[in-house]
């Protein structure tokens, strides 16, 4: 691959002159410009845009750390980020992590090396304390409440909606509630918030045998319903972490010729609208849009959006 020094050698002009031609700067004579451009064309030279941007103190890459895209939470966040970035001139770089701390640490090191101007963590496996250590090297935006850590945050305030959801179920005299979560309690603030809201309303913890983590898809909901129905046949309600997961639960009961328990979803997807079961809209598209906006800022900022309980009439 030809370099700027190859162009200088073949054109007979200095590296600084070649650089001025490449960056369309002034103070280059017409003969010099024509000679350099002729060699550039002959060598099919393509400038290193990253190196050029860094030389001007700029970087147009925003990294989005994405554990996976199997759950609508991540899809909606990403859609919001992409929507906000479309006309910005910035490039969105997807950084898969699968919650691997070593992989996430490498992304932080790349931020330190200025490969990214900012990182948006849709979720993470590393502790917030580690993320905070890298905030000095560039903007880091977390899609959760970062508490006292010096990290920017854009997130949904979910706790009031979870409380409202369980209070709604309490008015329906629902008692045996199966809870389907995306991650385990020690890993996920969201899972912890759901369990805390349940306990506040019902004054006891949910039955451990009726709680399953690792739910991301329709098929996960189907398999969870199969497992939990075998454990306990009198489940009144499935409180799930996604509308499509709730739909998977429903399909299992239909396939067995059984009456489906009450269903409660999240993410306000088409499935809850068509099947008319309650859901919670966390406004993740809007969160994603705002997260990108904050990523462009050099200031430490925090924004929250209220989740919304939706109960069909």
Image: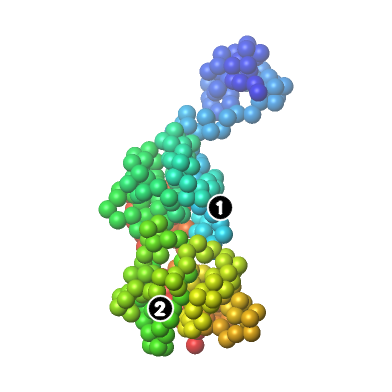
The correct choice, above or below, for 83 with respect to 210 in the image is above
Left or right: where 110 falls relative to 43: left
Res. 251 visible in picture: yes
Q: Position of residue 73 (x, y in %)?
A: 50, 62
The answer to which image quadrant residue 273 occupies is bottom right
Q: Is residue 294 visible?
A: no
Q: Is 46 drawn above or below residue 81 in the view shown? A: above
Report the residue marked by disc 2: 165
Query: Around disc 2, counting alpha carbons within 10 Å, would you say few (fewer than 14), some (14 to 19), or many (20 or more)?
Result: many
**Where is residue 72 shown, x and y percent of the image?**
54, 64
In this rendering, the answer to whether 180 lies above or below 276 is: above
Q: Position of residue 18 (x, y in %)?
A: 58, 20
In the rendered structure, the answer to whether residue 281 lies left or right of residue 35 reads left
To which quarter of the image does residue 274 belong?
A: bottom right
Q: Which residue is mark 1?
A: 86
Which residue is located at x 43 percent, y 81 percent?
176
Quadrant location of the N terminus in the rendered image: top right
Residue situated in front as seen by the camera: 64 or 213? 213
Mark 2, secondary structure of its residue: helix
Mark 1–mark 2 CB contact (< 8 Å): no
Measured as percent of width and height from the top left, residue 206 is found at: 38, 74
Question: What residue is at 40 percent from the left and 65 percent from the top?
Answer: 191
Q: Is residue 102 left or right of residue 34?
A: left
In three-dimensional space, the C-alpha distance between marks 1 and 2, rounded to whole angstroms, equals: 36 Å
Under circle 1, the secondary element is: loop
């Amino acid at each position: 691959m030809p370099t700027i020094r190859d162009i200088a050698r073949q054109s007979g002009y200095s590296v600084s002159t070649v650089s001025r031609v490449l960056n369309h700067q002034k103070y280059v004579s017409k003969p010099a410009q024509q000679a350099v451009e002729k060699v550039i064309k002959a060598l099919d030279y393509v400038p290193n845009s990253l190196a050029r941007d860094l030389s001007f103190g700029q970087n147009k890459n925003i990294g989005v750390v994405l554990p996976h895209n199997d759950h609508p939470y991540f899809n909606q966040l990403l859609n919001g980020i992409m929507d906000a970035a479309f006309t910005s001139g910035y490039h969105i770089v997807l950084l898969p992590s699968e919650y691997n701390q070593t992989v996430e640490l490498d992304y932080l090191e790349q931020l330190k090396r200025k490969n990214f101007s900012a990182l948006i963590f849709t979720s993470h496996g590393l502790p917030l304390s580690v993320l905070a250590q890298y905030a000095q090297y560039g903007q880091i935006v977390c899609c959760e409440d970062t508490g006292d850590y010096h990290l920017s945050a854009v997130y949904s305030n979910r706790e009031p909606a979870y409380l409202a959801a369980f209070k709604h179920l309490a008015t329906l005299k629902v008692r045996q509630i199966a809870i389907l979560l995306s991650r385990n309690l020690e890993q996920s603030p969201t899972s912890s918030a759901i369990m805390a809201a349940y306990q506040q309303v019902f004054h006891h913890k949910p039955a451990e045998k009726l709680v399953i983590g690792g739910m991301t898809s329709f098929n996960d909901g189907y398999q969870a319903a199969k497992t939990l129905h075998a454990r306990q046949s009198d489940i009144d309600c499935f409180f799930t972490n996604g509308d499509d997961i709730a739909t998977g639960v429903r399909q299992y009961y239909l396939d067995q010729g059984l009456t489906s328990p009450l269903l409660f979803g999240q993410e306000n997807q088409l499935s809850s609208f068509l099947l008319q079961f309650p859901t919670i809209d966390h406004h993740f598209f809007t969160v994603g849009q705002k997260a990108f906006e904050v990523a462009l800022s050099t200031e430490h900022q925090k924004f929250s959006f209220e989740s919304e309980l939706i109960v069909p009439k």
